[in-house]
Amino acid sequence: MTFKCVYEHQKWTGTIIEKHNYGSHWEIRIESRSGITVLFGQTSMGNFACLPDYGAGCYLAELDNEFYNTEKLINVINPVDGITVAKGLKTFAKKNIHL
């Protein structure tokens, strides 16, 4: 699954190269300007994303809410990777699941 990202005057492409359903959560691997592993799922407080390589995580809205999720993600990781993850989750949700 390939998707396009934009931030300020920069444009880049991301690709979800792996996906795994563990029942209680999902794991995807995004290749873009860097490689990003994202664990995500649902809790009683809503959806969440965990980015182990960054030692970071946050709550999310629905996976297709790219605007809100971008805002949450760029508070815990850099803007380029936050945008990439939010766009990747939206792309994933369109083609696979809705939490």
Image: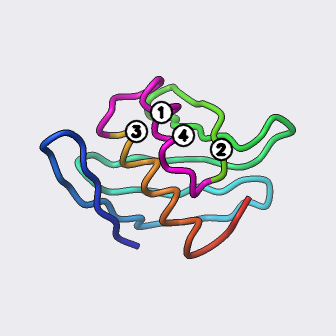
**Residue drawn at point x = 59 percent, y = 65 percent:** 93
Instruction: Residue 98: name its quadrant.
Output: bottom right
| Callout 4 amino acid | Tyr
Q: CA distance from mark 2 to mark 3?
A: 14 Å
- Chief secondary structure of the magenta span? helix
Q: Does residue 86 sit above or below 91 in this rendering?
A: above
Q: Mark 2 or mark 4, which is nearer the start of the sequence? A: 2
| Callout 1 amino acid | Glu
Q: Does residue 33 sit above or below 17 in this rendering?
A: above
Label 4 Cα neighbours within 10 Å, binned few <14 / some 14-19 / many ≥20:
some
Q: Mark 3 or mark 2, which is nearer the start of the sequence? A: 2
Report which residue position mark 3 lands on. Answer: 82
Residue 19 numbered mark, or none: none
Residue 61 numbered mark, or none: 2
| Callout 2 amino acid | Ala
**Picture coordinates of residue 94, whole percent (x, y):** 56, 71
Is 76 in the magenta? Answer: yes
Q: Are marks 4 and 2 in contact (CB under 8 Å)?
A: yes
Which tag is nearer the camera, tag 3 or tag 4?
Answer: 4
> Helix or strand or loop: what does disc 3 sit on?
helix
Report which residue position mark 4 lands on. Answer: 68
Q: Mark 4 or mark 3, which is nearer the start of the sequence? A: 4
Q: CA distance from mark 3 to mark 4?
A: 11 Å
Which tag is nearer the camera, tag 3 or tag 1?
Answer: 1
Q: CA distance from mark 4 to mark 2?
A: 7 Å
